[in-house]
Amino acid sequence: MPRWIQKELRSNFVRASRAGKRAAKTEARASTVVYRPKEHALQMRLTNGAAITLPLELIPNLRRASPQDIRAVEILGQGGGLHWESLDLDISVPGLLSAVFAWPEWLAELGRIGGRKSSTETAAAARRNGRKGGRPRMR
């Protein structure tokens, strides 16, 4: 294999390793997953300490699976995925959580919270505009 290809492969590996480490620190990851047959739900404890119970009705690929198959869930890697060998199914934990919590109300709340954040520059500009009589009118 030419040296330039080896160098490129090594560089790609280093970048992917860094991205994986960043994701492990910032994304929700599963530390434990248990099937709760009475609730027909998965109970997942996350690495950030949160515990979430997800009804299987919210996970289309598991709706019709047998309890025996669902119970055989494995956690992949550093908790970034869930795997069911008998179902030939892999699910990303961050993807699952973002899909479940992507309700319009949830997204609106995130936007409302994010909209309250103000940088020091924005606050200073608002004060300057206030001294001039408010925000300039659009023409």
Image (cartoon, rainbow, N blue to C red):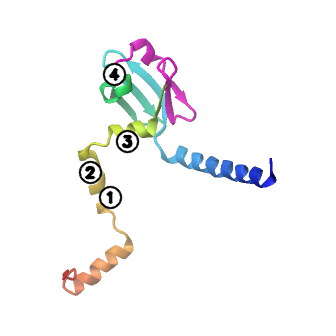
Mark 1 and mark 2: Cα distance apart in space: 8 Å
Q: Amino acid at mark 3?
A: Ser
Q: Is residue 65 magenta?
A: yes
> Which of marks 1 and 4 precedes in the sequence?
4
Percent coordinates x, y for residue 57 in the rendering: 30, 26
> Which of marks 3 and 2 precedes in the sequence?
3
Please, what secondary structure does the residue beneath circle 2 have?
helix
Mark 4 and mark 1: Cα distance apart in space: 34 Å
Percent coordinates x, y for residue 115 in the rendering: 29, 61
> Which of marks 3 and 1 precedes in the sequence?
3
Region rendered in magenta: 63-88
Mark 3 and mark 4: Cα distance apart in space: 19 Å
Tell me which residue sits at (42%, 39%) in the image: 95
Q: Is residue 40 above or below residue 50?
A: above
Mark 2 and mark 3: Cα distance apart in space: 14 Å
Q: Which mark is residue 98?
A: 3
Disc 3 versus disc 4: nearer the observer: 4
Q: Amino acid at mark 2?
A: Glu
Q: Residues within 10 Å of mark 4 (few under 14, many from 20)?
A: some
For disc 2, the marked residue is 109
Judging depth in this view, the residue of 68 and 32 nearest the camera is: 68
Disc 1 versus disc 3: nearer the observer: 3
For disc 4, the marked residue is 63
**Tags 1 and 3 touching, CB below 8 Å:** no
Disc 2 versus disc 3: nearer the observer: 3
Q: Residues within 10 Å of mark 1 (few under 14, many from 20)?
A: few
Q: Is residue 72 above or below residue 14?
A: above
Please, what secondary structure does the residue beneath circle 4 have?
loop
Mark 4 and mark 2: Cα distance apart in space: 29 Å
Q: Amino acid at mark 4?
A: Arg
Tell me which residue sits at (38%, 23%) in the image: 62
Q: Is residue 84 magenta?
A: yes
